[in-house]
Image (cartoon, rainbow, N blue to C red):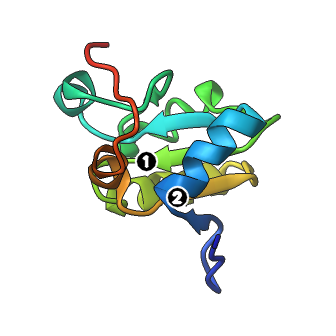
Amino acid sequence: MPEKRPGEPFTRITVEEARKMIDEDNAQVIDSREPHEHAEGHVPGSVRIQHMATLAQADKIARDRPVLFICKSGQRSAVAAEFAASVGITDIYNVEGGHEAWAEAGYPMETGD
């Protein structure tokens, strides 16, 4: 069940909820990890924007559909989602458990850039 906590500009979702949103809503996925982590395996079609580069690369973030932030476990993506909110992006989600939970669920992963 999506969870919206007081003071957080994003909604927390599980990998199952993320997968459903990607399949049904054409959501954009932002991978907030380091380049080498992304290359080792990521959600198919995700856009890599390191969490600390979110503000500098905000122009790459969709504003017309849900945006899902994901990292290794959910910490850096939460920071990235906070940055996105600070530039006016509102339909944002943090994928709890990150790529670790995604892989554990057996969902597809791409490698390379």
Mark on residue 70? Answer: 1
Mark on residue 94? Answer: 2
In this rendering, would 109 be left or right of 94? Answer: left
Residue 72 appears at what percent x and percent y?
A: 27, 50
Q: Residues within 10 Å of mark 1 (few under 14, many from 20)?
A: many
Give the residue drawn at x 52%, y 58%. Answer: 94
Give the residue drawn at x 50%, y 47%. Answer: 69
Give the residue drawn at x 37%, y 47%. Answer: 102
In this rendering, would 78 be left or right of 100? Answer: right
Residue 8 appears at what percent x and percent y?
A: 60, 75
Which is nearer the eye, 55 or 78? 78
Mark 2 belongs to which amino acid? Asn
Which is nearer the eye, 104 or 96? 104
Mark 1 belongs to which amino acid? Ile
Which quadrant of the structure image shows residue 58? Answer: top right
Vertical relation: 84 (above or below) 11: above
Which is nearer the eye, 18 or 4? 18
- Quadrant for the C terminus in the image: top left
Residue 10 appears at what percent x and percent y?
A: 63, 64
Q: Residues within 10 Å of mark 2 (few under 14, many from 20)?
A: many
Q: Is residue 27 visible?
A: no
Asked which secondary structure carries label 2, the reply is strand
Residue 26 appears at what percent x and percent y?
A: 72, 31
Asked which secondary structure carries label 1, the reply is strand
Q: Which comes sooner in the sequence, label 1 or label 2? A: 1
Give the residue drawn at x 34%, y 62%. Answer: 75
Which is nearer the eye, 50 or 91? 91
- Could you tell me if the residues under marks 1 and 2 are in contact, i.e. CB atoms within 8 Å? yes
